[in-house]
Image: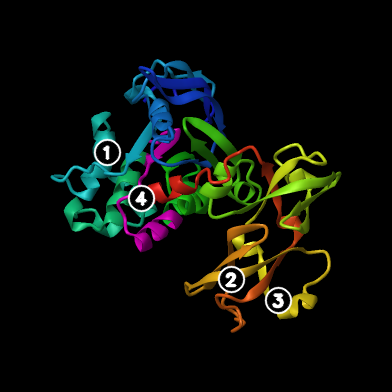
Amino acid sequence: MTDTPTGGDVRLAGISKTYGSFTAVHPLDLTVPEGSFFALLGASGCGKTTTLRMIAGLEEPTTGAVLLGDRDVTDLPPHKRPVNTVFQSYALFPHLDVHENVAFGLRRRGVKSVKRQVDEMLDLVQLGDKARHRPHQLSGGQQQRVAVARALINHPRVLLLDEPLGALDLKLRRQMQLELKRIQTEVGITFVHVTHDQEEAMTMADTVAVMNAGRVEQLGPPAALYDNPRTTFVANFLGTSNLVEGRVTSAGAEVAVTAGGAALTLPADRCAAPARAGGALLVGVRPEKIALTHADDAATVPAGRNRLTGRIADTSFIGVSTQYTVDGPAGTGLQVYEQNIERDPRLVPGAEVVLHWNPAHTFGLDAAQDAEAGVETVEGAA
């Protein structure tokens, strides 16, 4: 690698990618802060991998520029960019042991003495005792760590990860999420990670860009995206949301809405759409924010909470929580997740209930959007 830039951030300035009449990535401006763990999250075909490949130099942008630090690398071939990529397949050399796989990049650059650097890198990924093993003797998670070590030993400014955990089973994938975050924290370089797995992105990344149809729908810290989505796609793609259409009755610091005969309120700064009296608004709340009270105990619900009434249609016990599906005047198929701490035996299908939650946990979205956007995409990407 040559001409290392002075800054480690990635900046995409108006980049786009078209294939004939198909636009894979619409003009995009994006900045990845130096030293951050950044995730491009989206379903298959949303443009996230194409964006990553343009950063790597494996795809040429149709328009725009790729900058690493203060240097324009748009016209540089991949091997001259200060980036390395870890792919889902790992692409380890089967005829070389772990030590030589990691040393490959150094030897290719003519470095004679590689043992110390390789040993340090294997210690970083906790594989020092596997140095003389061949790839086929390692687990999937160990192979993935070898691939990371092989990329990091070249001291790239940016490490690109293209669905690196996709081939692992669920338990190992969760372990490797923590392992990758530990490695990124220790080495301190910028990681740009492409994934379709919402949990994976939120577990590891400092910043997440949710992509849909070649555009970034929303960008920010995982908690901010989850708690205050700005589009129906983000609300549905990141976990599950209850979206109820209501009519705005007043708007100020708080927005008052009627939905299904119930009066609801939410903070104005949690409305992604202009709230005007008489206008429509999609009122959203996450299932785990809602408490469920049997209708016989409705009087015990504290004053000031948002509340809806309904009837339990279905229940699912999943260990840490019970998932309830509730139908009511405000909508059908409302989801409530309650931890299994003190379960009310009366909360069974057919029971009349009150759903209630803190108004501060409510968000508002543009009612002109498709309330189902992102739902089918999640199922298709699983």
Viewer-nearest residue: 344 or 195? 344
| Callout 1: SS | loop
| Callout 4: SS | loop
3 or 4: tag closer to the N-terminus: 4
**Residue at horizontal 24 percent and vertical 31 percent from the top:** 108
Viewer-nearest residue: 49 or 80? 49
Which residue corresponds to mark 2? 312
Of badges 3 and 1, nearer the viewer stands 3
Q: CA distance from mark 3 to mark 1?
A: 74 Å
Circle 3 crowding by C-alpha within 10 Å: few under 14, some 14–19, many from 20: some
Region in magenta: 152-178
Question: Disc 2, disc 1: CB below 8 Å?
Answer: no
Q: Is residue 19 visible?
A: yes
User: Is residue 231 found inside the magenta-colored segment of the image?
Assistant: no
Viewer-nearest residue: 343 or 47? 343
2 or 1: tag closer to the N-terminus: 1
2 or 4: tag closer to the N-terminus: 4
Q: CA distance from mark 1 to mark 4?
A: 32 Å
Which residue corresponds to mark 4? 165
Residue 171 badge: none
2 or 3: tag closer to the N-terminus: 3
Tell me where residue 141 appears, x and y as whole percent: 31, 56
Question: Disc 1, disc 4: CB below 8 Å?
Answer: no
Please name the colour scheme applied to the rendered image. rainbow
